[in-house]
Amino acid sequence: MKKYLIALVFSFLFIGTYSQSELLQSGPMVGYSDYREVLIWVQTKAEADVKIEYMAEGESGKFTPTYHTTSNNDFIAKLFPTEVEYGKNYTYKLYINDIYVPRDYKLEFQTQTLWQWRTDPPDFSFAIGSCFYANEPKDDRPGTPYGAGYEIFNSILSKDPDLMVWLGDNTYLREPDFLTERGIRHRYKHARSTSELQPLLGSVHHYATWDDHDYGPNDADASYANKKITEKAFNDYWGNLNTDAAGVGGITSHFLWNDVEFFMMDDRYHRDPNRKLTQDKAYLGDAQLDWLIRALTASKATFKVVCIGGQTISNAAVYENYATYTEERQELLKRLHEEKIQGVIFMSGDRHHTEISKMERFNAYPLIDITCSPLTSGIHNPRDEGNTNQVKGKTFYKRNFGIVNVSGPRKERRLTVTIYNTNGEKIWDYSVQVSELRYKD
């Protein structure tokens, strides 16, 4: 009888764990990290109570408050471990309806290190990538599937980055999606649920900006009628530290990681149409551009990384590059120089190829743009687009991702980006010393 009762208890426990696992749609995903809290994102398939237990090595577990998911925001829970100490690594466990839901990969997060006035900034690394297309045959266009190579997410995880910066086109809205909130949210949920993506979500902190495909239709601009809906969906599905930093709508945000500050710009919400014939077309728009210059001027970061969905430093006026918005791009470059803002480096996606652009300037340090694209979406053959700022030998025309390492003493910091193919094999690297991004006295 005793053996029967023990077996019965274990049977109930097994059934309970299995049934709660079936309730999990996607995640957990680690969002932003700060000194005193982090964000953990989870999505269920139906209403459920969700919480996280977290613990540092040698410490007992602590629980976040329970969050009850509802259909109002696609059954998404955002959980905030707050009983944490800075500069520590934590493991965590997921509970749905008070039952532990194990994952077969690591679940970890870290808090920011308090290094200021104490030590040199810690070395760290972050992944970059853009253009993630997850196939769904019933909604895709006929012919060869546009997305492939989802094992790339395992390759990214194998490089053990501290965080990942998503540079736009992080999902691809399609014809059945554009016109309704239900369509937009379906697409976000479908992409986020990609099985190969889940281990990367669970232990690497994620930050994102968008470009046209996760904002609206191809080449979408400020006229897109559903932009407030996609703004809400984007903010629901990502775990950025802040949003609408410029205060004029859109998903502009920024965050610090050690001595590097990231400025996540919105190149869609305020954008004039590509086909607008009159001059002075808006790309970021006046208010967002003003905010960026103020924020860069105020920043004391060693490297100031400006992330924009489209290329900034390429001078090829093709497709949707910033070069096709001549007046505003020139205004940005002029104001960077007038304010003598140091340490600026651009990062971008969109182009379905990877390249480095470097623009030499008179009496100023050169401006560099690291373009990294695509993760899983389509590619094109090598071609000369007329970008005379392109760094020779630093292009790649297949699916890829980048790992950026920031290392060295504070006054000798070095930023090195290494490009890898889908299988995690090194293609090339490119390095810049902080002294190369400084105005001379």
Image: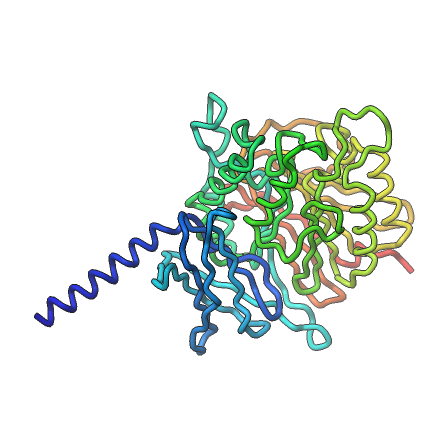
Residue 41 point in image, percent of width and height: 50, 56
Identify the image quadrant of the N terminus. bottom left
Residue 387 point in image, percent of width and height: 75, 32
Can I make out residue 392 in this image?
Answer: yes
Residue at the (70%, 41%) spot, across then down = 356
| Viewer-closest of 421 and 174 | 174
The quadrant in which residue 379 appears is top right
Question: Left or right of 52: which side holds 242?
Answer: right
Q: In this view, does 63 lie above or below 248?
A: below
| Viewer-closest of 182 and 342 | 182
Identify the image quadrant of the C terminus. bottom right
Question: Left or right of 9: which side holds 125?
Answer: right
| Viewer-closest of 75 and 154 | 75
Residue at the (83%, 55%) spot, across then down = 294
Residue 206 point in image, percent of width and height: 57, 54
Q: How many marks?
A: 0
The quadrant in which residue 82 appears is bottom right
Residue 405 point in image, percent of width and height: 63, 57
Q: Residue furthest left?
A: 1
Residue at the (57%, 44%) spot, across then down = 233
| Viewer-closest of 393 and 107 | 107
The quadrant in which residue 399 appears is top right
* Colouring method of the image: rainbow
Question: Left or right of 73: which side holds 169?
Answer: right
Can I make out residue 399 in this image?
Answer: no
Q: Is residue 132 above or below residue 299?
A: above
